[in-house]
Amino acid sequence: MGVNLSDITEGRTVRLLNFKGWTVAIDAYNAIYQFLATIRQPDGTPLSDSKGRTTSHLSGLFYRTMSIMELGIRPIYVFDGTPHQLKARTLKERSEVKRKAEEEWKAALEAGDLEKARSKAQQTSRLTKDMADEARHLLDLMGVPQLTAPSEGEAQASHMVITGKADAAASQDFDSLLFGCPKLIRNFTLTGRRKLPRKAIYVNIEPELLDLNNILSKEGLTRAQLVDIALLVGTDFNEGVRGIGPKKALKFIKEYGDLEGVMAAKAVAVEDHGTLRRIFLEPQVTDDFQIRWGDMVATDIKAFLCGERDFSEGRVDAILGKMANVRDSRAQRSLDQFF
């Protein structure tokens, strides 16, 4: 989930068309979890094939990625590597949240409250190794590049933007800003009309572009100070200080300069803050990779999605046909040439 800095950061709403020609490094796990949470039946049950295997992640990955590429955007999916040991607490807490949500989902189904059931079901999403492998396989069939980060996928995606290998990173998590990402796109894979939980109200979700330099300049902060704010609030790697939210943390850092100043003045503690800072300021990343867009072979995609996973052949054909028309109109044969 990452740290929520929405109260102290401001982006601008943009259209996907604005990113035509951009290379976007996508936090793969973040995107796939979104697909698993949102692509479900009315009662909250995930989409599945005739063998009972979940297909929500494949559906979202295929249709969303194709729509992005149709606009002339180059996606690169960055998968998580080995999590930092300090993330163990967060992973355990998330597992408990899922377990409790599963119980509440079942109870809501028994009570006939489908709206609550769907809401609770969205909190139960689990991304297994098999699902991740299936996602990688589908991307290979689509000719879309991917890589596995040494540790955090969003840290690697941010590094790719910093080093000019991508124009922006895409993730829902504000952690990308802490990792130094110059340009972060939120809602990149969630664009569309969404119903608010427990309300008969629909809202349009559009991409939001956050510029790190603008955010820091507006608040008169350094990136290190932004990291200190996050550590006071709490991140995936630490619990933060009880009673301190983003606005109060911002006020304290501006007043006392850094985390050490806040801890001394307010008699609070953030344990092992030196290590925590280094997670964000000196993240584990790599430059040992190549980015190549390959050929998209429609027959192989159909064999996997329709033949093995029971996708609608007509719908898959329609999407593949649109992509073929785009490629043909530019007299190009491969995705690498297409872009």
Image (cartoon, rainbow, N blue to C red):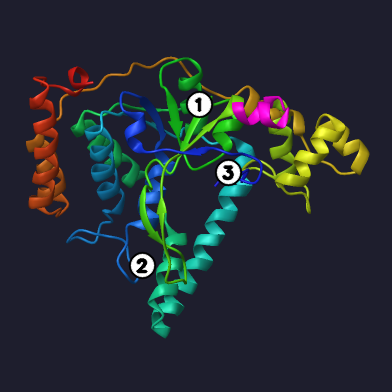
Q: On residue 2, which mark appears?
A: 3
Under mark 3, the amino acid is Gly
Q: Is residue 71 left or right of residue 224?
A: left
Q: Relative to the observer, which residue lies in front, 165 or 152? A: 165
Under mark 2, the amino acid is Gly
Under mark 1, the amino acid is Ser
The main secondary structure of the magenta stretch is helix
- Under circle 2, the secondary element is loop
- Under circle 1, the secondary element is helix
**213 w.r.t. 101: above or below:** above
Q: Percent position (x, y) of residue 252?
A: 82, 39
Residue linked to disc 1 = 158
- Under circle 3, the secondary element is loop
Q: Relative to the observer, which residue lies in front, 157 or 66? A: 66
User: Mark 1 touching mark 2, by CB under 8 A?
Assistant: no
Please report the bounds of the magenta region as a residue range.
214-223
